[in-house]
Image (cartoon, rainbow, N blue to C red):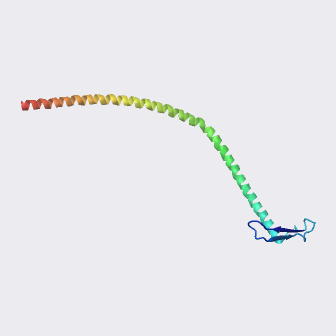
Amino acid sequence: LLLLLGAGGAGGAGGHVTIDFSGATSNPMYNMEHSTASRAFRDEFEEAKQRQDAGLDDISKGLAVLKNLGGEMDEEIKRQTPIIDAIDNKLDTTNLELRTANGKLKHVITQMRSTRHFCIDVILIFIILGIGLYLYNTLA
């Protein structure tokens, strides 16, 4: 069997490629014998495949450990959820009580400050009247 390929078109230079199958036999296994290089390649491929399998086994074990950890974390979260909810409810109650206390304290402070300002205002009025009376007496 002789195969001739013509290289025409834009990229070809017009040369021909010839492939000669005349030495091939009708037995497909005739040319399939392993050479030293092909055996070395196959052995290297098998070793790489075994290393890859070992690596995948390690990954599988790691994933199993992570799955167990995830399950334990889920159980712990389920166990602590009621506790967290109780703490949240107590915080809401305490926050409400604190707001009420702050409102009462603000009211008391406002009352105290207005009373204090009233006293200071009365004292200042008496001082101004005293200064005015002194000036009136000294100038008159």
Q: Count numbered badges in the picture.
A: 0
Instruction: Please provide percent x and percent y for residue 67.
Output: 69, 47
Give the answer, above or below, for where 39 lies relative to 66.
Answer: below
Is residue 8 visible in the rendered image? The answer is yes
Expressed as whole percent of the image width and height from the top left, the position of residue 113 reads 31, 31
In the image, what residue occupies the spot 76% across and 68% down?
12
Q: Is residue 125 above or below residue 37?
A: above
Q: Hey, which quadrant is residue 115 in on the image?
A: top left
Residue closer to the observer: 125 or 27: 27
Residue displayed at 47% across by 30% down: 96
Name the one closer to the observer, 103 or 140: 140
Question: What residue is drawn where x is 85% and y is 69%?
Answer: 4
Q: Residue at x 74, y 59 (%)?
A: 52
Name the quadrant containing residue 39.
bottom right
Percent x, y of residue 51: 74, 61
Q: Is residue 33 visible?
A: no
In-image side of 105 versus 25 (left or right): left
> Would you say 131 lies left or right of 82 here?
left
Quadrant of the snapshot with the C terminus: top left
Q: Position of residue 119 (x, y in %)?
A: 25, 29
Asked if residue 113 is positioned above or below residue 10 in the image, the reply reads: above
